Amino acid sequence: MDNYLVTSFDNGVTRIREKYIAEDWRCNIWHISGRDKDLLIDTGFGLSPLRQELAELSPRPIIALCTHSHHDHAGGLCQFEHRYGHANEAEIFTYPTIESTVADLLDVTVIKKQPYDGFDIHTWSYQSASLTKCVDEGDVIDLGDRHFQVIHLPGHSPGSIGIFETKTGYLFSGDALYDGILYDHLYHSVPDQLQNSLDRCLALPLKVVHAGHYDSFDLNRAKVITEEYRAGKRSMLCPSV
Ligand SMILES: [Zn+2]
């Protein structure tokens, strides 16, 4: 996988990161192996082929699910046949724009290598990727031997979802919860909702959070992040703290 960095975790989980996107910007793409099919959580910018490269990991069919519609998570979704996400952002997946996918936050420092001739970070937005299935709170994604619960975690964006596996205690949290400053200042962010979503994450019997950005962490770290957010220390709205 020339354009990707691949790291294996326990229980058939693989983290894939885009080599040529700045470290503090690229999302974690999570590949989870199942008996009958695999689950891919988020798809990165999609500036280089991902679908074909995943064939090196597994021959099984793939469900590609986006935790939300932002450019750094949903850019590669169009490469996949089975595309899952939340109805609140279905319109954005179908009609992505620079503004609706918050690609207007990007600048030239984010892209470390020109992906193709004619690429311009100032005008780029990802290709349309209509959802083939809308998922919502309480839905279960069945891989044959593994079952993942969908949890609606709005606040960062209205259709943000987390994916939780009871058997392993793994939460794939997208941008609702990661170990960094949380983006609660975007055009469709609602900070109070984000606080509720963080509290909901803590109520789960979680062992490991595999987040949308940066490293994975345990429940204790999730508690620290949540309390620091409550105190205004991890909010983009309080940059001076
Ligand atoms: Zn986001």
Image (spheres, rainbow, N blue to C red):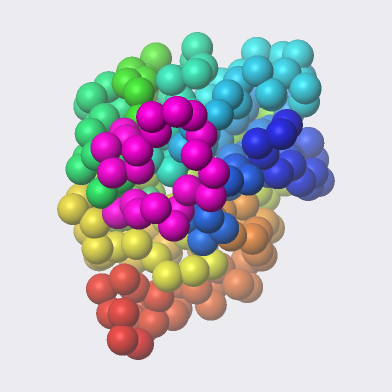
- What x and y, as percent, mark residue 84? 44, 24
- What x and y, as percent, mark residue 25? 48, 55
- Judge left or right: residue 113 versus residue 61: left
- Residue shown at the point (58%, 24%) measured from the top left: 49
Q: Is residue 145 above or below residue 8?
A: above
**In the rendered image, which quarter contains the N terminus?**
top right
In magenta segment, residue 223: no
Q: Residue furthest bottom?
A: 241
- What x and y, as percent, mark residue 195? 34, 66
In magenta segment, residue 107: yes
Q: Nearer the viewer, residue 228 or 148?
A: 228
- Residue 221 picture quarter: bottom right
- Residue shown at the point (69%, 24%) measured from the top left: 54
Q: Is residue 166 above or below residue 221?
A: above
**In the rendered image, which quarter contains the C terminus?**
bottom left
Q: Is residue 50 above or below residue 21?
A: above
Look at the magenta stretch and give its main secondary structure.
loop
Part of the protein shown in magenta: 105-125
Residue 12 in view: yes
- What x and y, as percent, mark residue 30? 62, 39
Q: Nearer the viewer, residue 125 or 239?
A: 125
- Residue 99 picture quarter: top left
- Judge left or right: residue 195 versus residue 206: left
- Residue shown at the point (54%, 67%) measured from the top left: 179
- Residue shown at the point (42%, 70%) measured from the top left: 181
Residue 206 in view: no
Q: How many marks?
A: 0
